[in-house]
Amino acid sequence: MLDIVQKNWRLYLIEVWALGMFMVVASLVVIMVEHPAFPVRAVIASPVLRRAIIGVCMGLTAIGLIYSGWGKRSGAHRTGGPAEPCRYIGPMAA
């Protein structure tokens, strides 16, 4: 198993980078849309509309990460979901 990790460590780091970027963007978007100190919350009274804005922003972030150069390299464009990294560890690992 160690040889598989040594072979694919770059892909693991790309996965970590993408997840980290997604979480940072998620935090910033939610803070900017939901925090009372920011004007977006005052301008958009509907919580459903605010959540829709957050959803669109997160969807665009995911698309950007998946179709970035690193996202394509890591296999993020495959729709394997959270189990996709396990593909590198299992018995069918390339």
Image (tube, rainbow, N blue to C red):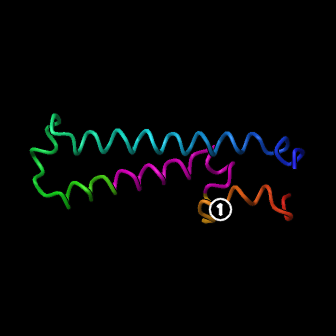
Q: Position of residue 19 (x, y in %)?
A: 54, 45
Taking the image as shown, residue 54 lies to the left or right of residue 85, namely left
| Quarter location, residue 42 | top left
Residue 72 lies within the magenta run: yes
Q: How many marks?
A: 1
Residue at the spot 72% in from the left edge and 45% down from the top edge: 11
Question: Relative to the observer, which residue lies in front, 40 or 36?
Answer: 36
Q: Is residue 54 above or below residue 23?
A: below
Residue 38 lies within the magenta run: no
Q: Position of residue 87 (x, y in %)?
A: 75, 60
Q: Circle 1 — which element?
A: helix
Q: Residues within 10 Å of mark 1 (few under 14, many from 20)?
A: few
Q: Position of residue 73 (x, y in %)?
A: 69, 48
Q: Amino acid at mark 1?
A: Ala
Bounds of the magenta segment:
56-76
Quadrant of the snapshot with the C terminus: bottom right
Q: Position of residue 31 (x, y in %)?
A: 28, 40
Residue at the spot 85% in from the left edge and 44% down from the top edge: 7
Q: Residue under label 1, please give it.
A: 83
Residue at the spot 37% in from the left edge and 41% down from the top edge: 27
Residue at the spot 34% in from the left edge and 38% down from the top edge: 28
Taking the image as shown, residue 48 lies to the left or right of residue 55, namely left
| Quarter location, residue 36 | top left
Residue reaching furthest top?
A: 37
| Quarter location, residue 6 | top right
